[in-house]
Amino acid sequence: MDYSEIEGIKDVTLDDAVEQLADVRKQLKTLHQVEWILYTEVVRQMDDIGATESRVEIGKVALTRPVSYDYSVLAGLREITDPEDLEGAYTPPHEEVQHIQESWNMTKAKPLKKLSHQHGSIIEDAKIFGRPKITIEENGNNGNDS
């Protein structure tokens, strides 16, 4: 973008440029505050109705929450699960050239829920939900992520 094309920027003095920059920063701060308020309101209202997707006047809104897992809670699975069942789901810490930390492949570990209620409880307790992400898909346009 050629910023010199924006009205009032091409031939400004330093004082004018600084003043305009300060004004723009104030406006941006206000817009960020308004965005946060609206963002949390959308999350709250979608949570209230139990929706992850909803049709709205301008198109469609989707709410997703990234999930990670607390390995200290998942450790309980190692105590109650046959090592054969953990194959591919759990990699213990080990040293090769460098120390490799333990890891869990949750795509393979989630099916362990079927083994018992206790397995399912541990996996659910280990969930750590990230910041919700709102995607707005306007009619006739691509999604707009927030």
Image (cartoon, rainbow, N blue to C red):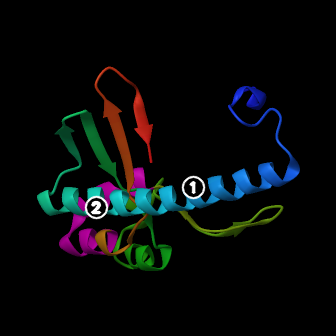
Q: Nearer the viewer, residue 137 or 81?
A: 137
Residue shown at 68% from the left, 31% from the top = 7
Viewer-side label of 2, 1: 1
Question: Residue 114: horizontal and vertical position, in percent?
Answer: 22, 60
Residue shown at 20% from the left, 69% from the top = 116
**SS at badge 1:** helix
Up-down: is 114 above or below 6? below
Q: Earlier in the sequence, mark 2 or mark 1?
A: 1
What residue type is disc 1 on? Leu
Most frequent secondary structure within the magenta stretch: helix
Real-space CA distance between mark 2 and mark 1, rounded to the nearest whole angstrom = 20 Å
Residue shown at 32% from the left, 75% from the top = 125
Q: To which residue does mark 1 refer?
A: 28
**Residue 67 in view:** no
**SS at badge 2:** helix
Q: In the current view of this chain or complex, which residue is farthest to the left?
A: 49
Up-down: is 69 above or below 63? below
Q: To which residue does mark 2 refer?
A: 41
Left or right: where 26 falls relative to 109: right
What range is drawn magenta here?
Answer: 106-123
